[in-house]
Image (cartoon, coloured by chain):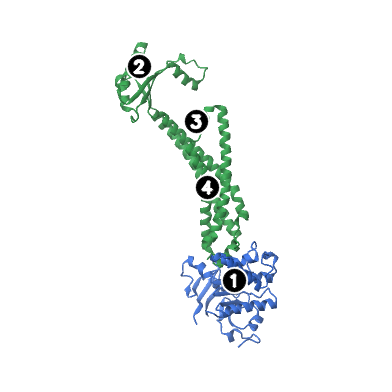
Chain colours: A green, B blue
């Protein structure tokens, strides 16, 4: 038996606009979500890099033998501590290389009285190595542990602001998408009102009428979501290409973690489902006003 | 006889406007054939809207099939509506559907689609003289053809109540007689038929009780003699 489609909403004017309006919103939402996920990945990388690692600064004394005695005492205390897997001096060459990355080749680092740094690896389960630090400070009171956690906590404030801003943009995009779907569904309902009223009198269930509108919204919003995510992916590639031209290492640093691709891939699905539910509720409310 | 329609002190207003129907009280028994007659603006269309459950009353009690329509759950209303066939004055065919699809629509909404039903629809369209226009869109049909599609759509589910608004208004005499004959046939097998009409000729030729409306009030709830007063050649 032939299928009768009394509400072919895909052909109606207001519905055709939905992908055009939702695509930019999906684009903005995807970029905001990607920004949020990149920042989360960066923080996770930093934390992973600092986990089980401790850096201690041994200030240079007035004379070299005293300095060397401090370093030896520190290494001995750390080497004897059960929480310490290894402890070694960061050589002047390595320290220079690390600093040169930041200050450039034009600066002669030998002109500065650089402190001696100890790179300490803790055994798993040693936490932040507080016991080892106490043992070190007993042996060498001048030693100054560099607490990366404290530095990271200070950075956390900035990260929180960036994450909140990204989530705020995402929430705004979702709210705008919901408002758009409500407006389009209401316009659609008005455009098809005479047919809806007829179906109503002929005994159509509310879910039959709402189903037609929600399916149309699902299709159109899904299309808009796909276009938006596609454009966001193109933007991401362009940004990665630009970063790569500045420094290839930056591309790795700002790359999305592997797990973060899933939430981004789900943006079109989320857009479609959000539109479907919004359209359904909008039409059900409008139908309630009919009788 | 068991009443299938009962109105008690029914009022209807649209939004905050004045009441277009006031204190309407009448009853129609199952299997009756009743005309609704009245001048323009008397409230015939509003009364038909209540009878077809297109609106619910603003006040008073409307009982259809023994059920107070204001007291039942909203989800139960579609089931009641499917027991009522409606022929609109302006036909209200769906423009993008063909004639046969328009008639299939009530079956589709009731969830009883089958090849046998499609054959039944074809048979009905043949019967109303549209055998060769089944796949035509309403915009290509004449007024009379559109009206016949509308009537076929209204009767396809064998409704217990058939409500028709000026059903013979746009058709020639021969077709008009055939349609009224169809209504009488349906009435003979138990369908309650309610026809709003201006046509005194129609009432004269196929006499039945008349419910007279004027200024939103029932002036006569259906006594045949009273309803036909002043109509030349009215049936006894």
* Alpha carbon distance from label 1 to label 2: 100 Å
- Which residue does the image show at 53% across and 40% down from the upper left? A31
Please report whichever mark, 3 or 4, sits nearer to the chain's N-terminal start.
3
- Which residue does the image show at 56% across and 51% down from the upper left? A180
For residue A71, which numbered disc appears in the image?
2
Residue A61 seen in the figure: yes
Residue B225 versus residue A253 in the image, above or below: below
Image-based side of B73 in relation to B216, left or right: left
* Alpha carbon distance from label 4 to label 2: 59 Å
* Alpha carbon distance from label 2 to label 3: 34 Å
Residue lying furthest front in this view?
Answer: B116
- Name the residue carrying label 4: A269
Image-based side of A68 in relation to B23, left or right: left
Residue B212 seen in the figure: no
Instruction: Work out whether disc 3 and disc 4 sit on a shared chain.
Output: yes
- Name the residue carrying label 3: A253
- Name the residue carrying label 1: B154
Instruction: Work out whether disc 2 and disc 3 sit on a shared chain.
Output: yes
Please tell me whether mark 1 sits on a helix, a strand or a loop. helix
Crowding at dot 1, Cα within 10 Å, few <14 / some 14-19 / many 20+, comes out as many
User: Could you tell me residue B195's position as x and y percent?
Assistant: 60, 77
Please tell me whether mark 4 sits on a helix, a strand or a loop. helix
Image-based side of A99 in relation to B185, left or right: left
Residue B109: name its quadrant. Answer: bottom right
The chain to which mark 4 is attached is: A
């Amino acid at each position: 038996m032939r299928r009768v489609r009394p509400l072919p909403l895909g052909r109606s004017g207001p519905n055709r606009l939905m992908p055009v309006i939702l695509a930019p919103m999906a684009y903005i939402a995807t970029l905001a979500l990607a920004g949020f996920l990149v920042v989360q990945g960066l923080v996770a990388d930093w934390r992973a890099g600092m986990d089980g690692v401790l850096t201690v600064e041994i200030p240079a004394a007035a004379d070299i033998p005293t300095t060397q005695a401090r370093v030896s005492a520190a290494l001995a205390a750390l080497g004897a501590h059960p929480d310490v897997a290894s402890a070694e001096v960061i050589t002047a060459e390595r320290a220079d290389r690390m600093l040169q990355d930041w200050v450039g080749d034009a600066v002669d680092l030998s002109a500065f009285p650089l402190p001696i740094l100890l790179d300490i690896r803790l055994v798993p389960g040693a936490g932040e190595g507080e016991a080892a630090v106490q043992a070190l400070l007993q042996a060498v009171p001048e030693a100054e542990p560099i607490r990366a956690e404290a530095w990271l906590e200070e950075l956390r404030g900035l990260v929180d602001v960036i994450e909140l801003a990204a989530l705020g943009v995402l929430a705004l995009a979702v709210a705008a998408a919901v408002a758009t779907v409500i407006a389009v569904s209401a316009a659609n309902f008005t455009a098809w009102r005479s047919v809806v009223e007829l179906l109503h009198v002929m005994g159509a269930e509310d879910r039959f009428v709402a189903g037609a509108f929600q399916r149309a919204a699902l299709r159109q919003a899904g299309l808009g979501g796909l276009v938006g995510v596609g454009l966001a992916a193109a933007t991401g590639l362009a940004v990665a290409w630009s970063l790569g031209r500045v420094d290839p290492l930056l591309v790795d640093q700002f790359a999305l973690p592997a797990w973060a691709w899933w939430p981004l891939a789900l943006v079109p699905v989320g857009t479609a489902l959000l539109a479907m539910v919004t359209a359904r509720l909008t039409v059900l409310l409008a139908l309630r006003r009919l009788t | 006889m068991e009443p299938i329609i009962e109105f008690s002190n029914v009022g209807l207003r649209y939004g905050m406007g004045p009441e277009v129907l006031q204190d309407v009280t009448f009853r129609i028994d199952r299997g009756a054939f009743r005309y609704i007659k009245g001048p323009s603006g008397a409230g015939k269309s509003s009364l038909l809207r209540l009878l077809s459950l297109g609106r619910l009353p603003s006040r008073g009690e409307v009982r259809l099939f023994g059920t107070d329509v204001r007291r039942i759950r909203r989800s139960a209303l579609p089931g009641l509506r499917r027991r009522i066939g409606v022929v609109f004055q302006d036909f209200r065919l769906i423009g993008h559907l063909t004639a046969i699809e328009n008639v299939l629509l009530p079956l589709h909404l009731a969830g009883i689609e089958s090849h046998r039903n499609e054959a039944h629809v074809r048979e009905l369209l043949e019967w109303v003289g549209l055998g060769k226009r089944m796949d035509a869109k309403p915009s290509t049909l004449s007024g009379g053809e559109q009206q016949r599609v509308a009537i076929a759509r209204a009767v396809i589910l064998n409704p217990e109540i058939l409500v028709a608004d000026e059903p013979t208004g746009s058709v020639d005499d021969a077709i008009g007689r055939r349609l009224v004959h169809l209504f009488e046939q349906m009435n003979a097998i138990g369908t309650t038929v309610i026809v709003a009409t201006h046509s005194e000729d129609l009432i004269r030729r196929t006499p039945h009780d008349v419910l007279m409306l004027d200024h939103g009030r029932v002036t006569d709830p259906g006594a045949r003699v009273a309803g036909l007063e002043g109509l030349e050649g009215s049936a006894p």
